[in-house]
Image (cartoon, grey):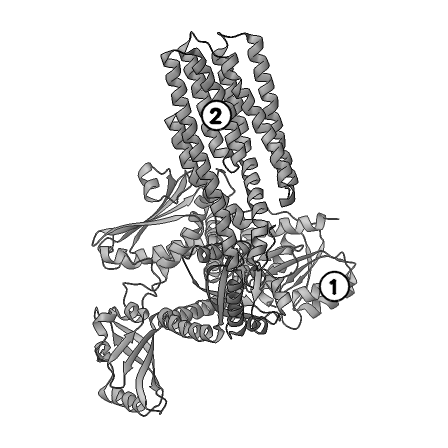
Amino acid sequence: MSAFFCASYKSLFWQKDCLYILIMSQKKLPRTSTDSDWEEKWGEAVLHEQIKLLYEASPLSVFATILIATVLVIIQWKVFDHQLLLAWLGAFVAVSLYRAGLFVSYRKVEPDISQSLKWESYFLAGSTAAGLFWGITPFIMFEEALVTHQAFLAFVAAGMSAGAVSSLSPRRMAVFSFLTIVLLPLILRFVMVGDEMSISMAIMISLFFILVSVNANRIYLNTHQNITLRMQSQKNEEALKASEIRFRQLFEGNRSVELIIDSNSGQIIDANPAAERFYGYAREQLLALNITDINTLSDEEIKAEMALARSEHRNHFIFKHRLANGDLRDVEVHSGPIEWSQQEVLYSIIHDVTARIEAEDKLRKLSQAVEQAGESVVITDNQGVIEYVNPSFSKITGYAASEVIGKNPRVLKSGRQSKAFYEEMWASISSGKLWQGQLIERRKDGSLFPSSLSIAPIFDENRVITHYVGVQQDMTEHELLENKFRQAQKMEALGTLVGGIAHDFNNMLAGITGNLYLAKKRLGDMPDVQKKLENIDDLSFRAAEMIKQLLMFARQGSVESLPFGLTSFIKEVSRLSEASIPENITFTIKTCPEELVVRGDTTQLQQSIMNLLNNARDAVASVENPAIRLVLDEFRPDQYFLNKHPECSSSLFARMMVQDNGCGISDVDKEHIFEPFYTTKEVGIGTGLGLSMVYGAIESQGGLVEVESNADVGTIFYIYLPLMEEKEMMSSIEVAEEVISGNGELILLCDDNADIRETTCDVLESIGYKTVTASDGLEAVELYRAKQKDISMIVMDVVMPRLGGVKAVERIMEINPNVKVLFATGYDKDETLKSEMPSEEHVVLSKPYDIGHLSQVIHEHLEKE
């Protein structure tokens, strides 16, 4: 019982606070300015709040009583008649459901003050009925022989009484009637038993009854006190209104923009005239807006900022606000929580700081520009003492800012400029002029670098020089780019030169190969001479292949990544390589027997191999018994290789090895050999581009490059290219084809070179064709016009004076759209003639051409419908 009493006593203060809050929030009370009006309404207000508290506490009370009643029946089940117990419990539950229904109806109706007495009567009926059921319990569930059952019954009654204190105390009649109905029958029942224990229990329950009644009365009195306090606070309303008037005058008269904002929703509750002028909205328009309509932050960001202001973790903000005309302004906001009309709101004072932000932003941009500039920036006083250097100064010169501040810029002096140079510089800037020039400076580590320097004076408002600012650019990379550009120009000139030479050279080779064919055909049975002529013929085609390789080397076209047979390719490249390596150097080539198929650009790969072979040639120039090896084999990487190259995704590679026994590469140089323009050769011998081109070319094709070298021992370069799945591919080496004879068809041969025309005519006639010749396109058109019925086919040179081959064929096709044409040229088809080449439907033969191949192409064209 003491435990229930303590709980009941503590609930007193909880009830007091809740009651105070509810009364303070009541908006249905009429408000007047006289004490007599308040006294008149006092009783009704007290009753209304008391009834409200009764109904608010009833759901838990009803649930608890049903639960306790059920437990009681279960405990008494073995002792008393079951039908009696069930009847009692059923009736009790019915009363409890009635009380629960009252609570639901009350919440639904939300009655006003005038209905308080009616609802009180409803409540008293339910609580009294519940009390009666508890009151008759000692007469139907009291077993005199079982003390434990008696004690449990007393315990239940005491508990129900203690619970009633917390739920029924707002009304004296409700609580005292319930306590009396519940406890007095129990006291009487113990007295009727008459033994010593029962009398003691009756006394204890009587004391408990008195104590609980006192507690209930105290709660009741506190309820009255809280209501009284509320009514007394209303007396101060006029003073509060006067205070609000003063605040309103300050609010509306303030020149600063002021907004009152709902701290939860962000709705604008009030705005002063300064806000109307600043935002360009009328007051009614502002009050229809949410702060999200003005603030440019996202809704989530605004909620987060409002939460900070509401919790007073921050009260100063910088935002961008949108005006009615769409303009954006930077604003500084001081915002914090206040109580406004019994509601917590955010009171915000807003200042337009757009001009200040723009000035700060401009200053910040200038500062960041200087800090992040790629050029060195140095600021000195008017005596040349360094006051500031930016990070690029340290990056370029190697000096930390702390090492040069307070010193003169002469710490960078290299000694490459004369004293007069610096005197002229100082005279210029000290007179207020801008100075610009090129000079050589010295870094902290002693290395020199070319630089471009600009120095300008800084003036105060009186045009007096206060500081100097120097902007310096490291020109090392610029000079490297200039060298690279000059090298590119050389390569372009080389391409043009090779293209021009190739045309004349190929024409000469065409004449040679044609005459060789005729000579071999007329020799008859002279095998020794035939062998010599075949050797000359082979050498002629090898010379043509060398020209083709030179054209590919000098070409600057697009990169084509296509599958090709690397084994055959290496054999072809070796022909050009042998020509570039002196005979005193032992040059050996070893390839695997199977064809290794890779994907890549043959031009880039050829250049890479040539660069490595040329470097090897230079490396063995001063050693005895110089030797170079070019090896191609298949390579399957092991775990060490894969760990070393984690980017490697292929499981099988073609590996090329270029090995020499030359001077080798030092460990220091090995760290830089693949960097552009890095070279260990003498000035004028190397450009420093070769190995960087090799590295870039192989890497672009998905390959890897490695180097092993020791000084005075030799060097090995390894190139790894991923192998494709195909294991066989046709070799690019052309095999001599069988000559197919003609049947007397007439062929119009057009070429501006007389020797080519004569030799080609002889060759064509030797294999069974008739010929008619023209020296240019115009002559070819006229000949075809005159003999078109007899001419079966035209062999047309692409480039000729007066009228080129393509234009000539276009005119001939106007005469006969079905004319059969075979083009021939000694130029580079892919680059030199790419703007003059015929459409892809035409076949173009490169000079010199194999006679067998020529005869087969002519035969195929003549056989076409």
Q: Nearer the viewer, residue 460 or 8?
A: 8
Q: Which mark is residue 812?
A: 1
Amino acid type, residue under disc 2 in the picture: Met
Task: Residue 614 in the image: state x and y as whole percent.
Answer: 34, 58
The residue positioned 61% from the left and 72% from the top of the image is 280
Mark toward the viewer: 2 or 1: 2
Secondary structure type for disc 1: helix
Amino acid type, residue under disc 1 in the picture: Ile
Q: Quick check: 198 left or right of 544?
A: left
Task: Residue 864 in the image: state x and y as whole percent.
Answer: 72, 48
The residue beneath circle 2 is 160
Q: Which mark is residue 304?
A: none
- Hey, which quadrant is residue 273 in on the image? bottom right
Where 466 falls versus 126 (above or below)? below
Q: Nearer the viewer, residue 197 or 408?
A: 197
Task: Residue 612 in the image: state x and y as whole percent.
Answer: 35, 55
Q: Compare marks 2 and 1 and give the one earlier in the sequence.
A: 2
Residue 563 in sight in this render: no
Secondary structure type for disc 2: helix
Q: Quick check: 63 left or right of 638?
A: right
